[in-house]
Amino acid sequence: MAGIDYTSLIPNNVALHENRRLQRALEDWQPKFLEWWQDMGPNGFQAKEVYLRTAVSVDAQGWAKFGYVRMPDYRWGIFLAEPEVGRQVNFGDHKGQPAWQEVPGEYRGTLRRLIVTQGDTEPASVEQQRHLGRTCPSLYDLRNLFQVNVEEGRHLWAMVYLLDAHFGRDGREESEALLQRRSGDADKPRILGAFNEKTPDWLSFFMFCFFTDRDGKYQLASLAESGFDPLSQTCRFMLTEEAHHMFVGEAGIMRIVQRACELQREHRTDDLRQHGGIDLRTIQKYLNFHCSVSLDLFGSEISTNAANFYTAGLKGRFEETKRQDDHQLKHATYTVAELDGERIVTREEGALVSLNERLRDDYVADCARGVARWNEVIKKHGIEFELTLPHRGFHRAIGIFADVRVSPDGRVISQAEWDARHGEWLPNDEDKAYIQSLMYAVIEPGKFANWIAPPPRGINGQPVDFEYVRLG
Ligand SMILES: [Fe+2]
Ligand SMILES: [Fe+2]
Protein backbone atom coordinates (compact mmCIF):
# COMPACT_ATOMS: atom_id res chain seq x y z
CA MET A 1 0.00 0.00 0.00
CA ALA A 2 2.72 2.44 0.98
CA GLY A 3 4.54 2.22 -2.34
CA ILE A 4 3.36 4.48 -5.10
CA ASP A 5 2.89 3.17 -8.60
CA TYR A 6 4.67 5.64 -10.87
CA THR A 7 4.48 3.47 -13.95
CA SER A 8 0.87 4.34 -14.66
CA LEU A 9 -0.31 7.56 -16.23
CA ILE A 10 -1.66 8.70 -12.88
CA PRO A 11 0.70 7.88 -10.00
CA ASN A 12 -1.29 6.33 -7.17
CA ASN A 13 -1.33 3.98 -4.25
CA VAL A 14 -5.01 3.12 -4.54
CA ALA A 15 -4.71 0.32 -7.13
CA LEU A 16 -6.33 2.52 -9.72
CA HIS A 17 -5.80 -0.10 -12.46
CA GLU A 18 -8.33 -2.33 -10.69
CA ASN A 19 -11.10 0.24 -11.12
CA ARG A 20 -11.42 0.92 -14.81
CA ARG A 21 -14.39 3.27 -14.52
CA LEU A 22 -12.60 5.50 -12.05
CA GLN A 23 -9.34 5.32 -13.96
CA ARG A 24 -11.12 6.49 -17.09
CA ALA A 25 -12.83 9.36 -15.25
CA LEU A 26 -9.52 10.57 -13.88
CA GLU A 27 -7.70 10.13 -17.17
CA ASP A 28 -10.40 12.24 -18.74
CA TRP A 29 -9.94 14.93 -16.09
CA GLN A 30 -6.12 14.92 -16.23
CA PRO A 31 -5.70 16.91 -19.50
CA LYS A 32 -8.24 19.45 -18.25
CA PHE A 33 -6.23 19.86 -15.08
CA LEU A 34 -3.05 20.39 -17.11
CA GLU A 35 -4.81 22.93 -19.24
CA TRP A 36 -5.92 24.75 -16.10
CA TRP A 37 -2.34 24.57 -14.76
CA GLN A 38 -0.99 26.13 -17.96
CA ASP A 39 -3.61 28.88 -17.88
CA MET A 40 -3.81 29.62 -14.18
CA GLY A 41 -0.70 28.06 -12.63
CA PRO A 42 2.61 29.91 -12.14
CA ASN A 43 2.99 32.57 -14.79
CA GLY A 44 6.21 31.90 -16.72
CA PHE A 45 8.76 29.33 -15.49
CA GLN A 46 6.75 26.38 -16.83
CA ALA A 47 9.68 25.25 -18.94
CA LYS A 48 12.25 25.73 -16.17
CA GLU A 49 13.68 22.96 -14.05
CA VAL A 50 12.76 23.31 -10.40
CA TYR A 51 14.27 21.37 -7.50
CA LEU A 52 11.06 19.81 -6.16
CA ARG A 53 10.11 17.05 -3.83
CA THR A 54 7.73 14.38 -5.04
CA ALA A 55 5.95 11.87 -2.83
CA VAL A 56 7.24 8.33 -3.35
CA SER A 57 5.52 6.60 -0.46
CA VAL A 58 3.14 7.63 2.25
CA ASP A 59 4.90 6.30 5.32
CA ALA A 60 6.61 8.71 7.66
CA GLN A 61 10.15 7.72 6.71
CA GLY A 62 11.43 8.92 3.39
CA TRP A 63 8.16 9.71 1.70
CA ALA A 64 9.72 12.28 -0.54
CA LYS A 65 12.35 12.30 -3.26
CA PHE A 66 13.97 15.51 -4.48
CA GLY A 67 15.06 16.30 -8.00
CA TYR A 68 14.76 18.74 -10.90
CA VAL A 69 11.34 18.71 -12.54
CA ARG A 70 9.57 20.99 -14.98
CA MET A 71 6.33 21.86 -13.27
CA PRO A 72 3.95 20.58 -15.97
CA ASP A 73 5.82 17.24 -15.71
CA TYR A 74 5.24 17.01 -11.96
CA ARG A 75 3.81 13.60 -11.09
CA TRP A 76 0.50 14.69 -9.61
CA GLY A 77 -1.41 11.73 -8.37
CA ILE A 78 -3.46 10.07 -5.69
CA PHE A 79 -1.91 9.16 -2.40
CA LEU A 80 -3.80 8.01 0.65
CA ALA A 81 -2.27 7.45 4.06
CA GLU A 82 -2.08 3.84 5.24
CA PRO A 83 -5.48 2.47 6.26
CA GLU A 84 -5.94 1.97 9.97
CA VAL A 85 -7.03 -1.59 10.60
CA GLY A 86 -10.38 -1.84 12.36
CA ARG A 87 -10.92 1.91 12.34
CA GLN A 88 -14.25 3.09 13.73
CA VAL A 89 -16.36 6.20 13.60
CA ASN A 90 -14.91 7.94 16.62
CA PHE A 91 -17.54 10.57 17.43
CA GLY A 92 -21.15 11.60 16.95
CA ASP A 93 -24.26 9.45 16.69
CA HIS A 94 -22.47 6.62 14.87
CA LYS A 95 -19.62 6.39 17.35
CA GLY A 96 -18.36 2.82 17.65
CA GLN A 97 -19.60 1.66 14.23
CA PRO A 98 -16.98 0.53 11.70
CA ALA A 99 -15.68 3.48 9.66
CA TRP A 100 -17.48 3.83 6.32
CA GLN A 101 -15.69 2.76 3.16
CA GLU A 102 -18.59 4.01 1.05
CA VAL A 103 -20.54 7.24 1.42
CA PRO A 104 -23.60 6.73 3.63
CA GLY A 105 -26.59 7.63 1.44
CA GLU A 106 -28.14 10.02 3.95
CA TYR A 107 -24.95 12.14 4.09
CA ARG A 108 -24.16 12.17 0.42
CA GLY A 109 -25.00 15.81 -0.22
CA THR A 110 -23.37 17.09 2.96
CA LEU A 111 -20.18 15.17 2.43
CA ARG A 112 -19.92 16.26 -1.17
CA ARG A 113 -20.27 19.88 -0.10
CA LEU A 114 -17.53 19.49 2.52
CA ILE A 115 -15.16 17.95 -0.02
CA VAL A 116 -15.93 20.52 -2.70
CA THR A 117 -15.40 23.42 -0.28
CA GLN A 118 -12.04 22.06 0.80
CA GLY A 119 -11.11 21.16 -2.79
CA ASP A 120 -11.92 24.63 -4.07
CA THR A 121 -9.29 26.28 -1.87
CA GLU A 122 -6.48 24.26 -3.45
CA PRO A 123 -6.54 25.60 -7.03
CA ALA A 124 -7.64 28.99 -5.66
CA SER A 125 -4.35 29.58 -3.87
CA VAL A 126 -2.37 28.59 -6.97
CA GLU A 127 -4.34 31.20 -8.91
CA GLN A 128 -3.77 33.82 -6.21
CA GLN A 129 -0.02 33.23 -6.30
CA ARG A 130 0.51 32.88 -10.01
CA HIS A 131 2.31 36.18 -10.59
CA LEU A 132 4.71 35.98 -7.66
CA GLY A 133 7.48 34.17 -9.53
CA ARG A 134 8.37 37.33 -11.43
CA THR A 135 9.34 39.12 -8.21
CA CYS A 136 10.97 36.36 -6.17
CA PRO A 137 13.38 37.56 -3.46
CA SER A 138 15.69 34.60 -4.23
CA LEU A 139 15.90 31.29 -6.07
CA TYR A 140 15.41 29.54 -2.75
CA ASP A 141 12.11 31.34 -2.23
CA LEU A 142 11.09 30.82 -5.85
CA ARG A 143 11.53 27.10 -5.40
CA ASN A 144 9.48 27.11 -2.19
CA LEU A 145 6.67 28.99 -3.94
CA PHE A 146 6.58 26.41 -6.72
CA GLN A 147 6.71 23.54 -4.23
CA VAL A 148 3.67 24.96 -2.49
CA ASN A 149 1.93 25.47 -5.84
CA VAL A 150 2.46 21.93 -7.15
CA GLU A 151 1.35 20.48 -3.84
CA GLU A 152 -1.82 22.55 -3.82
CA GLY A 153 -2.35 21.13 -7.29
CA ARG A 154 -1.97 17.67 -5.81
CA HIS A 155 -4.42 18.50 -3.04
CA LEU A 156 -6.90 19.29 -5.77
CA TRP A 157 -6.22 15.83 -7.20
CA ALA A 158 -6.86 14.35 -3.78
CA MET A 159 -10.32 15.90 -3.54
CA VAL A 160 -11.16 15.12 -7.17
CA TYR A 161 -10.29 11.49 -6.52
CA LEU A 162 -12.83 11.37 -3.69
CA LEU A 163 -15.47 13.06 -5.82
CA ASP A 164 -14.91 10.77 -8.81
CA ALA A 165 -14.54 7.60 -6.79
CA HIS A 166 -17.52 8.06 -4.49
CA PHE A 167 -20.04 10.52 -5.90
CA GLY A 168 -20.73 9.25 -9.40
CA ARG A 169 -21.88 11.72 -11.97
CA ASP A 170 -22.41 14.54 -9.47
CA GLY A 171 -18.83 14.07 -8.37
CA ARG A 172 -17.51 14.30 -11.90
CA GLU A 173 -19.45 17.49 -12.47
CA GLU A 174 -18.02 18.98 -9.30
CA SER A 175 -14.52 17.98 -10.47
CA GLU A 176 -15.04 19.97 -13.64
CA ALA A 177 -16.43 22.94 -11.75
CA LEU A 178 -13.31 23.02 -9.55
CA LEU A 179 -11.33 23.85 -12.69
CA GLN A 180 -13.82 26.48 -13.83
CA ARG A 181 -14.16 28.82 -10.87
CA ARG A 182 -11.47 31.50 -10.67
CA SER A 183 -10.05 33.30 -7.67
CA GLY A 184 -11.32 36.88 -7.55
CA ASP A 185 -13.57 36.50 -10.59
CA ALA A 186 -16.81 38.46 -10.17
CA ASP A 187 -18.88 35.94 -12.15
CA LYS A 188 -17.42 32.64 -11.01
CA PRO A 189 -15.47 33.28 -7.82
CA ARG A 190 -13.93 30.67 -5.57
CA ILE A 191 -16.22 29.58 -2.74
CA LEU A 192 -14.52 31.16 0.29
CA GLY A 193 -13.70 34.84 0.79
CA ALA A 194 -10.00 34.64 1.68
CA PHE A 195 -9.42 32.70 -1.52
CA ASN A 196 -10.68 35.56 -3.63
CA GLU A 197 -8.27 38.09 -2.11
CA LYS A 198 -5.17 39.09 -4.03
CA THR A 199 -1.71 37.83 -3.08
CA PRO A 200 0.12 40.67 -4.81
CA ASP A 201 3.51 40.55 -3.07
CA TRP A 202 5.78 38.25 -1.11
CA LEU A 203 4.98 39.68 2.30
CA SER A 204 1.35 38.76 1.58
CA PHE A 205 2.43 35.35 0.31
CA PHE A 206 4.30 34.48 3.50
CA MET A 207 1.41 35.75 5.62
CA PHE A 208 -0.98 33.70 3.51
CA CYS A 209 1.10 30.56 4.07
CA PHE A 210 1.26 31.24 7.79
CA PHE A 211 -2.39 32.13 8.39
CA THR A 212 -4.46 30.76 5.54
CA ASP A 213 -2.61 27.49 4.97
CA ARG A 214 -2.90 27.00 8.71
CA ASP A 215 -6.66 27.23 8.40
CA GLY A 216 -6.18 24.44 5.87
CA LYS A 217 -4.29 22.43 8.46
CA TYR A 218 -7.14 22.72 10.95
CA GLN A 219 -9.84 21.92 8.41
CA LEU A 220 -7.87 18.93 7.11
CA ALA A 221 -7.16 17.73 10.63
CA SER A 222 -10.89 17.79 11.44
CA LEU A 223 -11.71 16.00 8.20
CA ALA A 224 -8.96 13.47 8.92
CA GLU A 225 -11.12 12.43 11.90
CA SER A 226 -14.05 11.70 9.56
CA GLY A 227 -15.97 8.47 9.83
CA PHE A 228 -15.80 8.35 6.01
CA ASP A 229 -12.53 6.49 5.85
CA PRO A 230 -11.31 7.49 2.34
CA LEU A 231 -11.63 11.15 3.35
CA SER A 232 -9.69 10.49 6.52
CA GLN A 233 -6.88 8.69 4.69
CA THR A 234 -6.69 11.41 2.04
CA CYS A 235 -6.53 14.24 4.54
CA ARG A 236 -3.96 12.51 6.70
CA PHE A 237 -1.52 12.44 3.82
CA MET A 238 -2.35 16.00 2.78
CA LEU A 239 -1.39 17.18 6.26
CA THR A 240 2.18 16.01 5.79
CA GLU A 241 2.44 18.27 2.74
CA GLU A 242 0.61 21.13 4.42
CA ALA A 243 3.26 21.28 7.14
CA HIS A 244 5.80 22.51 4.61
CA HIS A 245 3.52 25.33 3.50
CA MET A 246 3.27 26.63 7.04
CA PHE A 247 7.02 26.33 7.40
CA VAL A 248 7.42 28.50 4.31
CA GLY A 249 5.13 31.10 5.87
CA GLU A 250 6.54 31.13 9.36
CA ALA A 251 10.18 31.03 8.28
CA GLY A 252 9.56 33.64 5.58
CA ILE A 253 8.09 36.14 8.04
CA MET A 254 10.82 35.32 10.52
CA ARG A 255 13.46 36.23 7.94
CA ILE A 256 11.69 39.51 7.14
CA VAL A 257 11.49 40.28 10.87
CA GLN A 258 15.16 39.47 11.27
CA ARG A 259 16.13 41.73 8.40
CA ALA A 260 13.98 44.52 9.86
CA CYS A 261 15.83 44.19 13.16
CA GLU A 262 19.23 44.18 11.47
CA LEU A 263 18.43 47.29 9.47
CA GLN A 264 16.91 49.00 12.50
CA ARG A 265 20.07 48.44 14.51
CA GLU A 266 22.41 49.32 11.70
CA HIS A 267 20.71 52.62 10.92
CA ARG A 268 19.43 53.41 14.41
CA THR A 269 15.92 54.11 13.20
CA ASP A 270 12.69 52.23 12.88
CA ASP A 271 11.90 54.10 9.68
CA LEU A 272 13.24 51.46 7.35
CA ARG A 273 11.66 52.64 4.15
CA GLN A 274 14.59 54.88 3.34
CA HIS A 275 16.80 51.80 3.74
CA GLY A 276 14.74 49.39 1.66
CA GLY A 277 13.49 47.27 4.54
CA ILE A 278 10.06 46.33 5.81
CA ASP A 279 9.54 47.83 9.26
CA LEU A 280 7.86 45.92 12.05
CA ARG A 281 4.83 48.21 12.06
CA THR A 282 4.12 47.38 8.43
CA ILE A 283 4.58 43.68 9.14
CA GLN A 284 2.00 44.05 11.93
CA LYS A 285 -0.52 45.55 9.50
CA TYR A 286 -0.16 42.67 7.05
CA LEU A 287 -0.43 40.26 9.95
CA ASN A 288 -3.69 41.95 11.04
CA PHE A 289 -5.14 41.60 7.58
CA HIS A 290 -4.24 37.99 6.92
CA CYS A 291 -5.17 36.86 10.39
CA SER A 292 -8.61 38.44 10.22
CA VAL A 293 -9.57 37.10 6.79
CA SER A 294 -8.34 33.65 7.82
CA LEU A 295 -10.42 33.73 11.03
CA ASP A 296 -13.49 34.19 8.85
CA LEU A 297 -12.77 30.84 7.19
CA PHE A 298 -13.86 29.03 10.36
CA GLY A 299 -17.42 30.30 9.95
CA SER A 300 -19.96 31.61 12.44
CA GLU A 301 -19.43 31.17 16.16
CA ILE A 302 -22.75 29.39 16.43
CA SER A 303 -23.42 26.97 13.62
CA THR A 304 -25.96 24.21 13.32
CA ASN A 305 -24.10 23.01 10.22
CA ALA A 306 -21.00 22.39 12.31
CA ALA A 307 -23.13 20.56 14.87
CA ASN A 308 -24.68 18.41 12.14
CA PHE A 309 -21.32 17.56 10.55
CA TYR A 310 -20.14 16.37 13.94
CA THR A 311 -23.23 14.46 14.98
CA ALA A 312 -23.22 12.72 11.60
CA GLY A 313 -19.59 11.65 12.13
CA LEU A 314 -18.35 13.54 9.07
CA LYS A 315 -16.08 16.22 10.56
CA GLY A 316 -14.53 15.91 14.02
CA ARG A 317 -12.68 18.22 16.32
CA PHE A 318 -8.96 18.90 16.03
CA GLU A 319 -7.28 15.80 17.55
CA GLU A 320 -10.67 14.28 18.29
CA THR A 321 -9.36 10.92 19.42
CA LYS A 322 -6.88 12.45 21.86
CA ARG A 323 -9.65 14.20 23.79
CA GLN A 324 -11.06 12.67 26.93
CA ASP A 325 -14.84 13.02 26.82
CA ASP A 326 -17.87 11.23 25.43
CA HIS A 327 -17.20 12.39 21.81
CA GLN A 328 -20.89 13.15 21.43
CA LEU A 329 -21.09 16.46 23.27
CA LYS A 330 -24.85 16.49 23.55
CA HIS A 331 -24.76 17.85 27.09
CA ALA A 332 -21.42 19.64 27.04
CA THR A 333 -20.99 23.40 26.81
CA TYR A 334 -18.32 25.67 25.38
CA THR A 335 -17.41 29.29 25.99
CA VAL A 336 -18.05 31.60 23.06
CA ALA A 337 -17.71 35.33 22.55
CA GLU A 338 -20.82 37.45 22.52
CA LEU A 339 -21.64 41.10 22.02
CA ASP A 340 -23.37 42.85 24.85
CA GLY A 341 -24.00 46.27 23.36
CA GLU A 342 -20.58 47.89 23.21
CA ARG A 343 -18.91 45.19 25.23
CA ILE A 344 -17.45 41.88 24.16
CA VAL A 345 -18.31 39.26 26.76
CA THR A 346 -18.44 35.47 26.81
CA ARG A 347 -21.21 33.01 27.48
CA GLU A 348 -21.64 29.27 27.68
CA GLU A 349 -23.19 27.69 24.63
CA GLY A 350 -23.95 24.13 23.62
CA ALA A 351 -20.69 22.45 22.63
CA LEU A 352 -22.09 21.09 19.37
CA VAL A 353 -23.16 24.38 17.85
CA SER A 354 -19.89 25.96 19.07
CA LEU A 355 -17.58 23.64 17.15
CA ASN A 356 -16.48 26.32 14.69
CA GLU A 357 -15.46 28.54 17.57
CA ARG A 358 -13.59 25.70 19.25
CA LEU A 359 -11.64 24.99 16.07
CA ARG A 360 -10.94 28.71 15.76
CA ASP A 361 -9.60 28.69 19.33
CA ASP A 362 -7.26 25.81 18.53
CA TYR A 363 -6.11 27.72 15.45
CA VAL A 364 -5.53 30.98 17.31
CA ALA A 365 -3.42 29.19 19.92
CA ASP A 366 -1.31 27.68 17.15
CA CYS A 367 -0.88 31.07 15.44
CA ALA A 368 0.15 32.60 18.77
CA ARG A 369 3.00 30.11 19.11
CA GLY A 370 4.38 31.20 15.74
CA VAL A 371 4.08 34.89 16.61
CA ALA A 372 5.96 34.21 19.87
CA ARG A 373 8.83 32.76 17.85
CA TRP A 374 8.97 35.92 15.71
CA ASN A 375 9.01 38.01 18.86
CA GLU A 376 12.00 36.08 20.15
CA VAL A 377 13.96 37.28 17.12
CA ILE A 378 13.00 40.87 17.89
CA LYS A 379 13.94 40.44 21.52
CA LYS A 380 17.31 38.93 20.64
CA HIS A 381 18.09 42.12 18.77
CA GLY A 382 17.24 44.14 21.88
CA ILE A 383 14.40 45.94 20.11
CA GLU A 384 11.30 46.89 22.02
CA PHE A 385 8.45 45.86 19.82
CA GLU A 386 6.02 43.01 19.99
CA LEU A 387 4.01 41.58 17.15
CA THR A 388 0.55 40.55 18.31
CA LEU A 389 -2.44 38.75 16.92
CA PRO A 390 -5.36 41.14 16.48
CA HIS A 391 -8.45 40.55 18.58
CA ARG A 392 -10.66 37.98 16.92
CA GLY A 393 -13.38 40.60 16.45
CA PHE A 394 -11.10 42.82 14.37
CA HIS A 395 -11.99 43.29 10.68
CA ARG A 396 -14.34 40.36 10.50
CA ALA A 397 -16.87 39.70 7.77
CA ILE A 398 -18.47 36.54 9.17
CA GLY A 399 -20.13 35.83 12.51
CA ILE A 400 -21.17 38.13 15.34
CA PHE A 401 -18.36 40.62 14.76
CA ALA A 402 -19.36 41.27 11.16
CA ASP A 403 -21.87 43.88 12.31
CA VAL A 404 -19.54 45.96 14.47
CA ARG A 405 -16.18 47.65 14.27
CA VAL A 406 -13.53 46.31 16.62
CA SER A 407 -10.01 47.67 17.14
CA PRO A 408 -7.04 45.25 17.09
CA ASP A 409 -6.92 45.44 20.90
CA GLY A 410 -10.53 44.37 21.16
CA ARG A 411 -12.58 47.52 21.76
CA VAL A 412 -15.89 47.93 20.00
CA ILE A 413 -15.48 51.30 18.29
CA SER A 414 -17.60 53.70 16.27
CA GLN A 415 -17.66 53.75 12.50
CA ALA A 416 -16.08 57.23 12.73
CA GLU A 417 -13.11 55.91 14.71
CA TRP A 418 -12.77 53.02 12.30
CA ASP A 419 -12.79 55.37 9.32
CA ALA A 420 -10.17 57.56 10.94
CA ARG A 421 -7.87 54.79 12.07
CA HIS A 422 -8.14 51.66 9.93
CA GLY A 423 -5.15 52.83 7.90
CA GLU A 424 -3.03 52.44 11.05
CA TRP A 425 -4.18 48.87 11.46
CA LEU A 426 -4.44 47.49 7.95
CA PRO A 427 -2.15 48.01 4.97
CA ASN A 428 -3.14 51.33 3.38
CA ASP A 429 -2.45 52.42 -0.19
CA GLU A 430 0.90 53.91 0.76
CA ASP A 431 2.00 50.69 2.49
CA LYS A 432 0.91 48.59 -0.46
CA ALA A 433 2.71 50.85 -2.92
CA TYR A 434 5.87 50.71 -0.82
CA ILE A 435 5.81 46.91 -0.54
CA GLN A 436 5.14 46.71 -4.27
CA SER A 437 8.18 48.94 -4.90
CA LEU A 438 10.39 46.33 -3.21
CA MET A 439 9.19 43.54 -5.45
CA TYR A 440 11.71 42.71 -8.14
CA ALA A 441 13.34 39.41 -8.94
CA VAL A 442 16.62 38.38 -7.32
CA ILE A 443 17.73 35.32 -9.26
CA GLU A 444 21.45 34.92 -8.63
CA PRO A 445 21.99 31.75 -6.55
CA GLY A 446 22.69 32.65 -2.91
CA LYS A 447 21.57 36.29 -3.29
CA PHE A 448 18.56 37.69 -1.43
CA ALA A 449 16.47 40.82 -1.70
CA ASN A 450 17.49 43.49 0.79
CA TRP A 451 14.25 43.20 2.81
CA ILE A 452 14.63 39.54 3.75
CA ALA A 453 17.41 37.63 5.52
CA PRO A 454 18.77 34.40 3.99
CA PRO A 455 17.45 31.20 5.55
CA PRO A 456 19.69 29.43 8.06
CA ARG A 457 19.85 26.36 5.83
CA GLY A 458 18.80 25.19 2.39
CA ILE A 459 16.29 22.60 1.25
CA ASN A 460 16.98 18.88 1.67
CA GLY A 461 20.52 19.49 2.93
CA GLN A 462 21.48 21.58 -0.10
CA PRO A 463 23.44 24.80 0.46
CA VAL A 464 21.57 28.10 0.53
CA ASP A 465 23.28 29.16 -2.72
CA PHE A 466 22.16 26.01 -4.53
CA GLU A 467 20.59 26.54 -7.96
CA TYR A 468 17.06 25.75 -6.79
CA VAL A 469 15.55 26.82 -10.10
CA ARG A 470 17.54 26.52 -13.32
CA LEU A 471 16.64 29.65 -15.18
CA GLY A 472 19.30 28.91 -17.81
FE1 LIG B 1 -3.67 22.45 0.30
FE1 LIG C 1 -1.27 24.52 1.64
Image: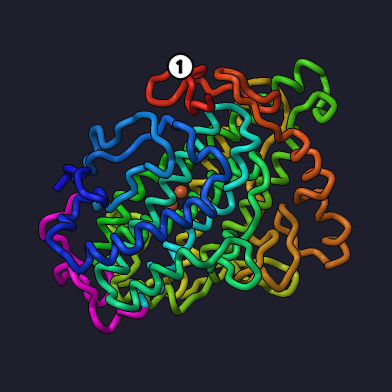
Q: Could you tell me what secondary structure mostly forms the magenta stretch?
A: loop
Q: How is the image coloured?
A: rainbow
- Of the residues shown, which amino acid type is indicated by label 1? Pro
Image: magenta residue range: 82-109
Asked whether, in this view, residue 24 is left or right of residue 393, the answer is: left
Residue 351 location, quadrant: bottom left
Query: 145 or 300: nearer the eye?
Result: 145
Image position of 168 with respect to 390: above or below: below
Q: Which residue is mark 1?
A: 463
- List x then y, in percent, for residue 334: 46, 67
- The structure residue drawn at horizontal position 31% and vertical position 58%, both measured from the top left corner, is 224
Expressed as whole percent of the image width and height from the top left, the position of residue 405 reads 75, 65
Q: Is residue 215 left or right of residue 454?
A: left
Point 29% across, 74% down: residue: 167
Q: Is residue 378 rendered magenta in the image?
A: no
Residue 90 falls within the magenta-colored stretch: yes
- From the top left corner, tell me how far across and down residue 387 is, in percent: 67, 39
Q: Is residue 75 positioned above or below 439 on the image?
A: below
